[in-house]
Image (cartoon, grey):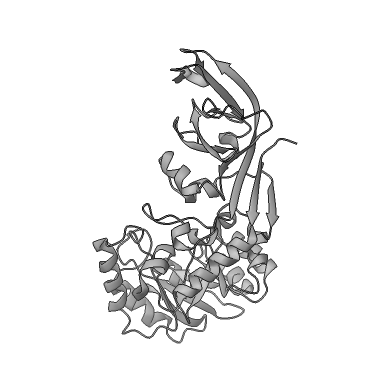
Amino acid sequence: MRPLIATIDLAAIRHNYAVAKRCAPGRQAFAVVKANAYGHGVREVVTALSDQADGFAVACLEEAAEVRALHGEARILLLEGCFEAAEYQLAAQLGLDLVLHNEQQLAQLLGTSLSRPLNTWLKMDSGMHRLGLDEAALRACHSRLQGAAQVAEVNLISHFACADERGHEVTEQQLEAFLDVLDLDFAQRSLANSAAILTIPAAHMDWLRPGIMLYGASPFAELGAAELGLVPAMTLTAQLIACRDVAVGESVGYGCSWRAERPSRIGTVSCGYADGYPRHAPSGTPLLVRGQRVPLVGRVSMDMLAVDLSDLPAARMGDEVQLWGAQLPVDEVARAAGTIGYELLSKVTPRVPRRYCNA
């Protein structure tokens, strides 16, 4: 079997969910498990949190149906709502909490006869300008939902644009915009993503939405997961499948983009961009061999990449290589590659086997 595996520590995910809850005593929390639980495996993550999580949040009906099959009672929040009028019946059958972010969705809901009323979440555009209603439209929609046969609860939700940049003025503006509509009668309110859970108590409201923190990565550029009390859930490991000496001036990889400036020892690693490792990662991006950081060299190939082992003479073919995980934070790798941990975790492809443990 090809030596590449993503080991998922389910105890770490449970720990990180508990961290979110401790940040906001008395609040409830939707564990965000969209995109196959950020690449960690939605079935395994939902099962691990089944007796701990207050609810789960997903992006689409297909994801909601998968979670409902695993957990018959939990609240499941459909973050983008329904995309077609015919989907509202299925949402009712699944017993979902439904986000409404435009007037068309509201009209479709009110025009449908449902098997049971739904908990609705009016999405406010508080300043991100991605999805949601402005204040005037929100107030009008709130009035239309009151007493409707299709509606059980009318709730309020919004999303921060810059909560991961501490002290950003837009965050304060969004919080004020959210508070300005709380004269309306909402049963439940939700505003805090991972960054706000960790650093903005005023945004905690009734329901939290821990996403990236659930998987042990940090939403902040300047604060690592360990500083926040989070434990990495995924460790991606491969193997050195070849080692060779390269003379001064010789190149490594496609395009000959890296050339040896000294006599070098190069290792080939059994992981590439078809596995989810970022093709755009530059030379110098760290990997871990025998507990020591070694730099990526040359372009990442589809199934392999190369590392410079010149300063690690003890390295041998067959040694384990950690691409990120327990000893090498995914956020550090992401920064080196010019991206974020969210992308690296969620892009680990299905051909990488997942192994689950409760370490």
Residue 56 appearing in the image = yes
> In terms of depth relative to the viewer, which is nearer, 111 or 277?
277
Which of 202/249 is in front? Answer: 249
Question: Horizontally, is 322 left or right of 333 in the view?
Answer: right
Q: Is residue 277 visible?
A: no
Find residue 110 and report its horizontal and vertical position in percent: 48, 76
Above-or-below relation of 340 to 147: above
In the image, residue 200 above or below residue 312: below
The part of the image, by quadrant, that contains residue 183 is bottom left
Question: In the image shown, does 221 or 79 lie closer to the viewer?
Answer: 221
**Rendered location of residue 118, percent (x, y):** 54, 78
Q: Is residue 328 above or below residue 123?
A: above
Residue at coordinates 57% horizontally, 41% vertically from top-left? 291
Q: Residue furthest right?
A: 1
Using residue 176 as the reference point, say whether residue 159 is left or right of it.
right
The residue that appears at 60% across and 27% down in the rendered structure is 268
How many marks can you see? 0
Residue 295 x %, y %: 49, 32
**Residue 109 image offset from top left, x and y in percent:** 49, 73
Quadrant placement of the C terminus = bottom right
Image quadrant occupied by the N terminus: top right
Residue 18 against residue 237 in the figure, above or below:
below
Task: Look at 43% across and 81% down and name the residue there.
Answer: 145
